[in-house]
Amino acid sequence: MDVLKVILPFFSTPKDYSEVLKKLASFAFYETYLITLLLRANPRFDAVLTGIESWGPIGKVVSIIPHYDVLNLSGVVIAFLVAILTLMFQFHDRISDVLGIRRRFDLKVILIPLCERVGTPITKEIETKMAQRRDALMHAVFYKYASSRADKPLVDKHDIEHALNAWSWFWVFVEAIFYFGVGAIVAWWLGLACTRFG
């Protein structure tokens, strides 16, 4: 069943954070494969990948695969590498760090409202200190009680899975914007290179 979730991530609801990471890596694979397929419409890009697919020992192995010339095998390899890197480096976290997505969410949606509910007034000074200690505070007052791995979390497991699913789709969308943005830049550059160098 785990293999099916990786092959068809569209239909899976993550039960824990590791399943979110697998879902993101699966989507990264499909997105990157589609991008390489679209980029192959550019003769220069296609020539580079075709050269790789027909080079020496690789070409001999590839040539025994039926219809290899329409399968975008280089795209499969590139997509697989991107998926592995996405999983290894938790790419959505890197994007979040750069854009401050999780930092703002943790502060504005979880920590500050939690303080207000227990009657703690939030000043700019307190908010600054909370921002500096955000990770420790989140582990102490939130993850400890709302973890998908806890045997008996205080938050209903269904609510946790619902949140994980919502966040996984959000990150799929954010990563897709990044990957397709990189693909657009490559396509633009290839178009520019074609017009300059003919």
Image (cartoon, rainbow, N blue to C red):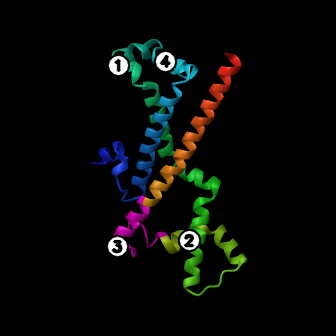
Residue furthest to the bottom: 119
Q: Is residue 98 visible?
A: yes
Q: Earlier in the sequence, mark 3 or mark 4?
A: 4
Residue 178 sits in quarter: top right
Nearest the camera: 12 or 92?
Answer: 12
Which label number is shown at residue 50?
4
Q: Is residue 8 above or below residue 81?
A: below
Q: Earlier in the sequence, mark 3 or mark 2?
A: 2
Give me the residue at 60% from left, 76% from top.
Answer: 112
Depth-wise, is mark 1 or mark 2 nearer the camera? 1
Q: Label 4 to label 1, Cα distance in Å?
A: 13 Å
Q: How many marks?
A: 4
Q: Disc 3 marks which residue? A: 152
Which label number is shown at residue 109?
2
Q: Earlier in the sequence, mark 4 or mark 1?
A: 4
Q: Label 1 to label 3, Cα distance in Å?
A: 53 Å
Give me the residue at 63% from left, 59% from top.
Answer: 100
Q: Are marks 3 and 2 in contact (CB under 8 Å)?
A: no
Other residues around mark 3 within 10 Å, as few (<14) / some (14–19) / many (≥20):
few
Residue furthest to the left: 1
The answer to if 44 sits in the magenta stretch is no
> Is 66 displayed left or right of 129 in the figure?
left
Range drawn in magenta: 143-165
| Amino acid bearing label 4 | Thr
The answer to if 152 sits in the magenta stretch is yes
Q: Disc 1 marks which residue? A: 67
Nearest the camera: 155 or 195?
Answer: 195
As helix, strand or loop, the secondary structure at mark 1 comes to loop
Q: Label 3 to label 2, Cα distance in Å?
A: 24 Å
Q: Earlier in the sequence, mark 1 or mark 2?
A: 1
Q: In x, y percent, where is residue 75?
A: 46, 29
